[in-house]
């Protein structure tokens, strides 16, 4: 159920109320009884509870797509299962395909054939 913010201009009270979408807006202030109790426009809050949520569903923009928090002290399987690599076992990156193709050579002009 959504949580709505209400404010009373008469007494200055501000409160949050959990209501169904189908419920009519509140009109009476619970503090002073004024009928000027109005719903404020505010950002909707939500919580990711339960299973089925992935780390990539909602990212922190500054982290570059990686999770910033780990639940229950768990570490990713890739970090704990990855064996240590040595430099001798891995081929040098330069031995791989070139990063970008070289540009084609510029055409050269050959001398004009002799008139015969």
Image (cartoon, rainbow, N blue to C red):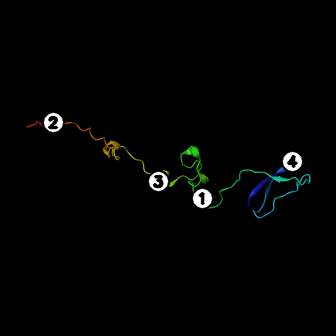
- Dividing the picture into quadrants, the one containing residue 29 is bottom right
Q: Nearer the viewer, mark 3 or mark 4?
A: 4
**Closer-to-camera residue (85/63):** 63
Q: What is the number of the mark on residue 82?
A: none
Q: Residue furthest bottom?
A: 22
Between the residue at mark 3 and the residue at mark 4, the CA separation in whole angstroms equals: 61 Å
Precedes in sequence: disc 1 or disc 4: 4
Precedes in sequence: disc 3 or disc 4: 4
Which type of secondary structure does the marked residue at label 4 adopt? loop
For mark 4, what is the residue? 9
Q: Position of residue 107 (x, y in %)?
A: 24, 38
Between the residue at mark 1 and the residue at mark 4, the CA separation in whole angstroms equals: 40 Å
Q: Position of residue 4 (x, y in %)?
A: 77, 55
Precedes in sequence: disc 1 or disc 2: 1
Between the residue at mark 3 and the residue at mark 2, the CA separation in whole angstroms equals: 69 Å
Which type of secondary structure does the marked residue at label 3 adopt? helix
For mark 1, what is the residue? 53
Between the residue at mark 2 and the residue at mark 4, the CA separation in whole angstroms equals: 94 Å
Precedes in sequence: disc 2 or disc 4: 4
Q: Residues within 10 Å of mark 4 (few under 14, many from 20)?
A: some
For mark 3, what is the residue? 81
For mark 2, what is the residue? 112
Q: Residue furthest left?
A: 116
CB contact under 8 Å: marks 3 and 4: no
Q: Position of residue 81 (x, y in %)?
A: 46, 53
């Amino acid at each position: 159920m959504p949580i709505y913010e209400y404010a009373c201009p008469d007494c200055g009270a501000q409160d949050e109320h959990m209501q169904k979408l189908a419920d009519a807006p509140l009109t009476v202030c619970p503090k002073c009884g004024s009928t000027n109790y109005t719903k404020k426009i505010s950002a909707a809050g939500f919580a990711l509870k339960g299973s089925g949520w992935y780390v990539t569903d909602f990212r922190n923009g500054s982290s570059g797509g990686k999770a910033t928090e780990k639940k229950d002290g768990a570490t990713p399987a890739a970090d704990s299962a990855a064996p240590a690599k040595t430099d001798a076992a891995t081929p040098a990156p330069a031995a791989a395909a070139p990063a970008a193709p070289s540009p084609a050579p510029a055409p050269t002009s050959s001398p004009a054939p002799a008139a015969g």
